[in-house]
Image (tube, coloured by chain):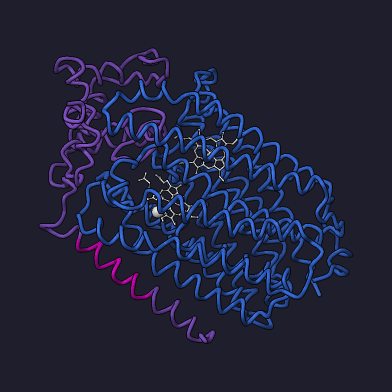
Chain colours: A purple, B blue
Amino acid sequence: MLSKKQARAFFLGGTLVTFLIFIGLTIYSFSKGNDQSNHENITESVVRGKKIWESNNCMGCHTLLGEGAYYAPELTKVIDRLNMKYNGQGEEVIKSILMSPVPWQPNGRKMVAYEMTEQEAEDVVEFFRWIGEIDLNGFDRIVSPLAKEDNNN
Amino acid sequence: MKYKSQKVAYWFFALSMLLLVLQLVYGFVMGFARIGFDNLHEFVPFNTARAVHTNLLVVWLLSGFMGAAYYIIPEEAQRELVNVKLAYVQLISLAVVGVVAVVGFHFNYWEGRKFLEIPRPLDFLVVINVLLFLGLILVTLFKGKRRTTTALVLSMGLLFAALLYLPGMLPFDSQVMDSFFRWWVVHLWVEGVWELIMGGILSFLLIKLTGVDREVIEKWLYVIVGLTFLSGVLGTGHHYYYIGVNKIWLIVGGIFSALEPLAFLAMALFAVNMYRKGEKKHPNKLALYWTLGAAIVSFVGAGLLGFAHTLPQTNLYTHGTLVTAMHAHLAFWGAYGMIVLAIISYSLPNMTGRKLYLTPRGRAAFWLSNIGMIGMTVAFGVAGVAQVYLERKFGMDFMLVQKEISIHFVVLIICASVFTTGIIMYIIEFYKHGRPTDEAMEVSIQ
Ligand code: HEM
Ligand code: HEM
Ligand SMILES: [Fe+2]
């Protein structure tokens, strides 16, 4: 039967090997040619948008890239989705929600009224635009309106 | 022989119980918001309630783990804790940092990074606090008469948990990178080093409660934590499928995360077998309930329900839906909530001298909380599966789907009330044990 020493060797060996592979794969995924995180298109405005996203904990209600809370809609392809719903006025609608002094509640569920400035709202839209162009291995098709169209037919 | 300094554990456990109650209050706030009673929106919007709910969860579990370490390490190392005063300083500073963070969440002082909402400046205080804790534990261990595998695995888990907090503090401009390294904390905690902590506590409890030979128990402990890391490290890939990183993770994450349930299965089999094998019949049956319960429920919540959505083909549809919340509740409860309640149930009679073993209230606390939590899991699960089909498969609008499934949140609240009743009974039982005393420590049986 397995001895305690062998059991320990299994633990230490397995950990070391998988950890090294993990580091290797991390480097691999962000190296040139394999990186698909849309890194090259990050502008100053996108970075400001991300800061706003973070400092208000938008992820505490919404998901983005499928991460966050499940109380409010997924925002990965939000511009496309609202473009479709509001005849191409998606960005304007987002900005007006963010700048509104009263809580937006289209279906009874309230969002916090952030009263952002035009510039701040513009940065958040830029951030969403950047997010929308990331290669998500097909997840975008599940949450985007175009895929939904296909599914409906 | 017991050690007087073990008593400090009591206060960590007391803090833990207090934070647990607060966590549940905020859980109800969210549950009610979801069925249309968002009356607290002005002061506690959903995102505040959520950040408080999950961060208090983490802090009460950590406080429980720390209490467990302060109780277990002296006994395993066979010496008093090196400095009891500093342990109290650490306790108070932990409570202060926790309270400041949670109050901050009500005033937009946070970082919207799921589970790591504590802002960076406070992160540094967390780090100092944890370093103090680790110092006390590790110095005690190394000055001790013996270094057992149980103590080593537990301390290693705590040390790695601290180290892994650091990648979460790195700043990035890219949301993708931010997420990528956030998982080094969140995933490698719950599906990695926290399992070492759980395994260490579990093996301590099994040694005490079943009387099975330490060598046998500790051998299997190595096998379990071996399986944990072998699957769990590369299993991190199950969070990388759809966040904007390379497709290689679909294969690596899929294969290795599918193996993760093995560690939990091994833990459940291990606990049940040691219980069967044990000659010793320890009178503290309630502690045994919680110990075996943790091993079994963690297999269901983390192992089976984790497996249910871990393959890339399923995760494509369930990623970021209420299916995740279903799994999250039973996994956290079974693996970490129950193991903390197990070590409390075991140690409390020893520290206070009041042997409230398996009272009717203690038994009711166990069953009500577990039945309530299973009901909550089913409610989240039904809501989640319905959401996946309506929204992701049939393309219905998010909010319309939410209206369809809101009835399941009524069920959730009912089950959460059963759960909470169990927890309140547990805490009454805790209170009835009274305070820890030196005399109790001297006479207590092993
Ligand atoms: C005690 C152990 C575990 C705990 C406490 C736990 C907890 C959690 C939590 C809180 C989340 C949500 C994370 C987030 O979206 O921010 C999550 C997600 C996930 N867990 Fe676990 N988990 C455990 C074990 C497992 C295991 C063993 C598996 C696989 C077999 C698994 C598979 C998953 C998957 C696939 C997700 C991602 C869901 C999504 O894409 O939205 N978990 N887990
Ligand atoms: C009174 C009991 C409870 C209620 C009513 C409750 C309710 C909730 C709700 C509504 C959410 C938010 C889901 C969303 O984003 O829409 C949530 C999240 C969460 N709760 Fe609870 N909860 C309770 C107890 C617990 C307990 C005891 C634990 C742990 C042992 C726990 C762990 C979590 C975790 C880890 C999350 C994050 C899940 C995720 O992101 O996938 N909760 N809870
Ligand atoms: Fe994970």
Quadrant (top left/top right/bottom left/bottom right) for the C terminus of chain B: bottom right
Query: Within the magenta stretch, is there residue B95?
Result: no
The residue at 43%/78% (across/down) is: A12
Residue A56, can we see it? no
Give the image location of residue B344, x and y in percent: 71, 56
Relative vertical location of residue B221 with respect to residue B87 in this rendering, above or below = below
Left or right of B37? Residue B231 is: left
Quadrant housing residue B278: bottom right
Give the image location of residue B400, x and y in percent: 35, 20
Quadrant (top left/top right/bottom left/bottom right) for the N terminus of chain B: bottom right
The residue at 27%/29% (across/down) is: B394
Relative vertical location of residue B88 with respect to residue B409 in this rendering, above or below = below
Query: Within the magenta stretch, is there residue A21?
Result: yes
**Total count of labels:** 0
For this rendering, which residue is in front, B401 or B42?
Answer: B401
Quadrant housing residue A110: top left
Q: Which residue appears farthest toward the left when viewing the image? A: A33
Quadrant housing residue B283: bottom right
* Magenta stretch, overall SS: helix
Relative vertical location of residue B311 with respect to residue B147 in this rendering, above or below = above
Residue B375, can we see it? yes
Left or right of A65? Residue B348 is: right
For this rendering, which residue is in front, A33 or B288?
Answer: B288
Query: In the image, which residues are magenta?
Result: A16-28
Give the image location of residue A37, x and y in percent: 19, 48
Give the image location of residue B391, x and y in percent: 31, 30
The residue at 33%/54% (across/down) is: B238
Relative vertical location of residue B435 with respect to residue B376 in this rendering, above or below = below
